[in-house]
Image (cartoon, coloured by chain):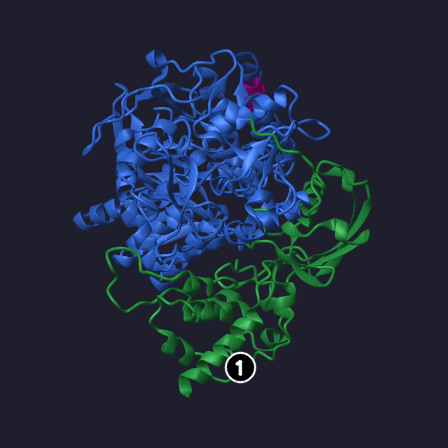
Amino acid sequence: MAKTNVTLTSSNAGMPEDRQLTVSIYRYNPDVDKKPYTQDYDIHTSEFQGVMMLDLLEALKIKDPTLGFRRSCSEGVCGSDGMNINGKNRLACVTSYLDFSNHITIRPLPGLPVVRDLIVDMTQFYKQYEKAKPFLQNKNDPPVRERLQSIEERNKLDGLYECILCACCTTSCPSFWWNPDKFMGPAALLWAYRFVADSRDTQKAERLEALEDPFSMFRCRTIMNCVDVCPKGLNPTKAIAHLRDEMLKDTS
Amino acid sequence: MSLSEHVFDAVIIGAGGAGQRAALQLAQSGKKVAMVSKVFPTRSHTVAAQGGINAALGNSGPDNWRWHMYDTVMGADFLGDQDAIEYMCKHAPDTIIELEHMGLPFSRNEQGKIYQRAFGGQTLNFGGDLAHRTCAAADRTGHAMLHTLYQKNVEARTHCYNEWYAVDLVKSVNGGIAGVIALCIETGEVVFLKSRATILATGGAGRIFQTTTNAHTCTGDGLGLVLRAGLPLQDMEMWQFHPTGIAGVGVLVTEGCRGEGGYLLNKNGERFMERYAPHLKDLSCRDVVSRSSMIEIREGRGLGPKGDYVLLKLDHLGEEVLKERLPTVMTLAKTFAGVDITKAPIPVTPTCHYLMGGMPTNINGEVLTVNKLGKDQIVPGLYGAGECASVSVHGANRLGANSLLDIVVFGRAAGLHLEAALQSGIEMPQVGTAELEEAMSRLNRWNFSQKGEDMHVIRTEMKMIMQKDFGVFRDGDTMNDGLKKLQALKERLAHAVLQDKSLTFNTARIEALELDNMMEVALSTAVSAERRKESRGGHSRIDFPDRDDAHWLKHSLYFGDGRVGERQVSQKTKETAPIELQLREH
């Protein structure tokens, strides 16, 4: 019978010590509030399970059901709960309060209209995403079996296809704040490059041409806030640099 | 009643893999179709599927869809319908190739073909060696699939009602379903989406349990809709507990971990699956592995302060393989368990993961009920696909990576069948005031509630009952006790109050409506589980430890008014002989 020495260096087994947190949350319900305000909630961490900011928000919502925020998977893959926590855009479900002091501030993602509390209107973000034509285009008839793609070709999609459309990057980008209708923003540009980089896509030239105007891509000033905040560790700035390189190659 | 009407050929409720695949089929054929989802489509729970999707492509050596069928029938502990399993396994390769052509970024093997890994319960040659049948995009297959399908729906300009909530089905005056009452979450607007046909693709309901791998949004909405429309649910006792939920948190780590060579250990460092299942070991079916882990825990060989978990060891696979094949697991283990998997094992415990039961459908996705004589009857205007449906390909226990397959195969099948039906003409259903009022009654009840109990107290109690009395091991006495408590809870819920009546993005209202559905699902599970007096697949009873084919080789039915019944399990295969009844490795 196989035996293995079991060593468990760290785990969730130990309960973290009880702390009293004060959470300042941006509140605005257009049905009842004339203008936004900040509400402070006091809560002991022993009152709820889990160490994530989403666990904390769920516990607060039981105390105050009027508090509005989006959430779904609770493991950082659906992209619902992007919000600004202590000044940085993050996903509440994979951000631990253990990393913060006892006073935490939560605001909606910046740069998009607030619908209610921590919920923003993402229409503009999705419009920019659609502008990237985020779907594979291949003008050749498909083969009977899969289109072949080498491991090396497929590796080029790593760091691109994993985007979860949480909007943490785009709403942290000053270029997007200034031109949300014309600058596509880091997420949409990451998707644009994901299809340019795909060996199975035949519309590379058209895709690059669509980005040639002064705004769609060229408003990126490599501020790199997007890289700093991406909860999936992706690098939209690098993708944008690749798009520019491809454009140069294309014209030379 | 002034209720604005939006009219469509087809309304699809749910935008996970099944809903989006159906919507794509209909949108591409030029039908007037609406896809309704309470979340933006890429936030649906398909996105969280990690390991992969099964198809006998044979990219890693010879394979045959008949072998896949055999494994699925065995895995289902013979409660699966063999006509549906045959259809799914046979159409799996084409469906996967179609997804690849759509752009799904599958991982690749040395030949540039789709990479296929080993997974639980998958064998070659009818129970022989382990098969490598599970197509994967690293450990993000669900994410890659859902985004690909959404991208194609963007291209097809599918009409989306994003962040709209389906309140209740509307019946037509001559039987059948005429559409659905839908609530715009952002504005509070309520409309009647009238359609020639409605497809339910609302996913699972794992949130009825205290700990689950499921998203907050998996609240069994379609199941509640069906019960309130007077239609039955099938095999609602059949829940899958995944062996590797991160202990204390519930977050899933994929079976692909064991597919790539990981294994489970008890506190003595023993690879205990060798003892329970000498042939497939850690890659036995999930019900078998979960039961084994629970026995280890119950017999005192678990770890942790409460001795309530076992370990999943991965470090021997090496950093390179882990980074390439299991990058998500690496991050999740770090985030939720504080574990570096290149150095230490992950604490894991069996966790509620998947509902095998649901609304009974045929292989075209048409929803079924039974008449007074117990004969199947198609419900006009209603389809179902994916986790909310019970077609039934999973029977009493689903094989890993058969769920992503189920959703695309039957989302597509429902779309194809409805496309043809629309082509030959489906009449627009007629609806009267009485039908609309009936469908509005639940929303009105909450909207006009003045005082009563807060719903969250009831929700918490429900989850605790389900966790305690309807888990991996079940027993008659405790289930009866749990059932009584649930019935009392349902009564309390009928008098609970919605304090916040505001219209703009009122998530409290949505959670109240969701709880109605969760309560229906919990009760259907409790009644069906208490009633099935045998152990089969995911339903394991201490008081009836054996499978009882003489009495229970049949689907169980549950109606919202408390009626129960049965349906035959189908053996009607078309191309291959049905798999004969036999015992499986328990």
Q: Is residue B38 above or below residue B306?
A: below
Residue indicated by mark 1: A218
Q: Residue at x 24, y 44 (%)?
A: B417
Tell me which corner region of the image, top left, top right, bottom left or bottom right, holds residue B578: top left
Tell me which corner region of the image, top left, top right, bottom left or bottom right, holds residue B533: top left
| Amino acid of disc 1 | Phe
Range of residues picked out in magenta: B482-491
The one of A202 and B556 positioned closer to us in this rendering = A202
Q: Is residue B489 magenta?
A: yes
Q: Residue at x 48, y 20 (%)?
A: B540
Estimate the x, y position of residue B404 in percent, counting from the top left: 40, 44
The colour chain A appears in is green
Estimate the x, y position of residue A81 in percent, counting from the top left: 60, 54
| A155 relative position to B460: left or right | left
Secondary structure of the residue carrying tag 1 is: loop
Estimate the x, y position of residue B187 in percent, counting from the top left: 53, 55
Estimate the x, y position of residue B64 in percent, counting from the top left: 27, 39
